[in-house]
Image (tube, rainbow, N blue to C red):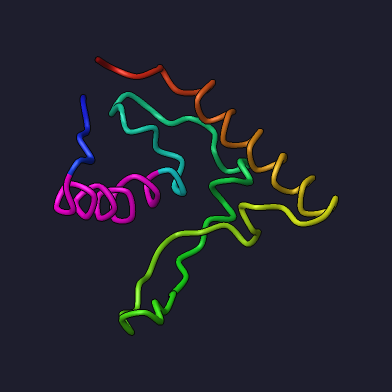
Amino acid sequence: MKIYLSSRHNLATFKLWMETEVIPNLKQGFNGKMNGLIQLSGNRFISDLKLNSYDNTENYVGMIAYSLPISMSPRNDYEDVLFNQYKSEFDALLIHGEGTEE
């Protein structure tokens, strides 16, 4: 499957798909291939994703999105350790998956 993110519509569709299908299914442990489950209950990256609301102060539009409870730009050694742990957990998802389809 190819996903084109070259327009606002495509980006919005992708975000909706991730937030309503992909992330909830991963949180339940489903691999999306309809052939079984993979063990994701111990994956900290998935389990720590939470829906959060954000306020865009430029245009006063609220937004809800999944995010992790850390900054993606670590500012100290502790945040750097957490960031690398989440990165390792995310990488583990790719290892457990079956790769990408062209």
Instruction: Look at the picture and state if 69 lies above or below 6.
Output: below
Q: How many marks?
A: 0
Q: Write the residue at 72% across / 53% down.
A: 74
Magenta-span inclusion, residue 20? yes
Q: Quadrant of residue 59?
A: bottom left
Q: Write the residue at 38% across / 52% down.
A: 24
Residues in magenta, as a range:
7-25
For residue 50, side relative to residue 69 (left or right): left
Instruction: Look at the picture and state if 53 lies above or below 22.
Output: below
Instruction: Look at the picture and state if 95 lies above or below 93.
Output: above
Q: Residue furthest front?
A: 58
Magenta-span inclusion, residue 69? no
Where residue 4 appears, x then y in whole percent?
20, 35
Which of the two residues, 73 or 90, is positioned nearer the viewer here? 73
Q: Quadrant of residue 84?
A: top right
For residue 10, side relative to residue 44 (left or right): left
For residue 70, side relative to residue 11 (left or right): right
Q: Write the residue at 44% across / 75% down.
A: 54
Where residue 32 appears, x then y in whole percent?
32, 33
Where residue 18 appears, x then y in whole percent?
32, 48
**In the rendered image, which quarter contains the N terminus?**
top left
**In the rendered image, which quarter contains the C terminus?**
top left
- What is the magenta segment's predominant secondary structure? helix
Q: Write the residue at 21% across / 26% down.
A: 2
